Amino acid sequence: MARYDTVEVEGSAMRLCLAAPAAPGPHPLVVVMCHIEGLDGFTEDRVERLAGAGFVAVAPDVFHHHAWIEARDARRASLRDRRIVNDIRAGIAHARAVHAVDAARIAILGHCMGGRTALLGAGNVPEIGPLVMYYGGRTMLSWGEDGPTPFQTIARVRGPVLGIFGNDDSEPSPADVDRIEAEFVRHGIDCEFHRYGGAGHAFQNFLSPQRYRAGPAEQSWALTLAFLARCL
């Protein structure tokens, strides 16, 4: 079962959702970047599933710098890329402090907004290797004008990449996905992109019945576990 810890980052208390396999380690670590709803039931479910598959998993709450903002657009606008990178670093450090983690085997994964911030982390945190990016939009924008966009850091990604997208999505659109994939290819980064017809944004989120698509959700999660097992 997942548990919640708190660490201090830049003078602010940040919650983390963590889970680990029952067997003794060291284990690979997967950083799970939350979507716009934060550390909700979906994020906790992914953390627990990863632990069940043999990975230590940690999800940092990147919304900790402010009181919770109900309006989604305003909540997103409160985020700053530099702070998110520091939150990822703090999450890795805490997971290594409390669980048996193999520091040479660290991946990052995220859905929706978390797909964007997972790419941001992969391009800015040297310890991170493999990247799993689920329908991450707004990768070509800087949040808070805090430096390069996630897209501009693609050249610094150090591991293979698995991209999961819905063809009915508009953020990112199929054209955006093509551009992102082409940038990985241009830099010689091993990447595997999967696109699902009849699926839009957040199709893996079972908490959103209008968006959830069982077939693509199950298929893409099986691909994710196989990719992580192979790469870590």
Image (spheres, rainbow, N blue to C red):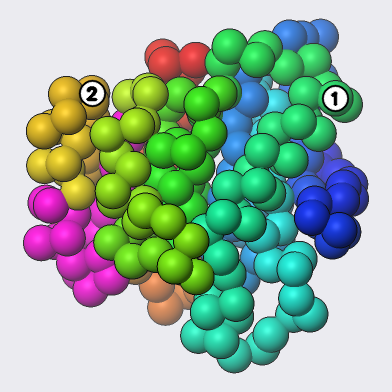
- The residue identified by callout 2 is 190
User: Which segment is the magenta one?
Assistant: 161-179
SS at mark 2?
Answer: loop
Q: Position of residue 3 (x, y in %)?
A: 86, 44
User: Image point 28% across, 48% down: which residue?
Assistant: 152
Task: Identify residue type, mark 2.
Answer: Asp
Please name whichever residue, 27 or 184, is drawn nearer the observer in this view of the structure: 184
Q: Is residue 113 left or right of residue 152?
A: right
Can you give x and y, in whole percent of width and height, for residue 155 in the image?
27, 34
Residue topped by disc 1: 97
Tell me where residue 105 sits by quadrant: top right
Which residue is located at x 87 percent, y 51 percent?
8
Which of the 4 quarters of the picture holds residue 116?
bottom left
Indicate yes or no whether the magenta region holds residue 191: no
Image location of residue 187, percent across then percent down: 17, 29
Pick the residue in front: 125 or 159. 125
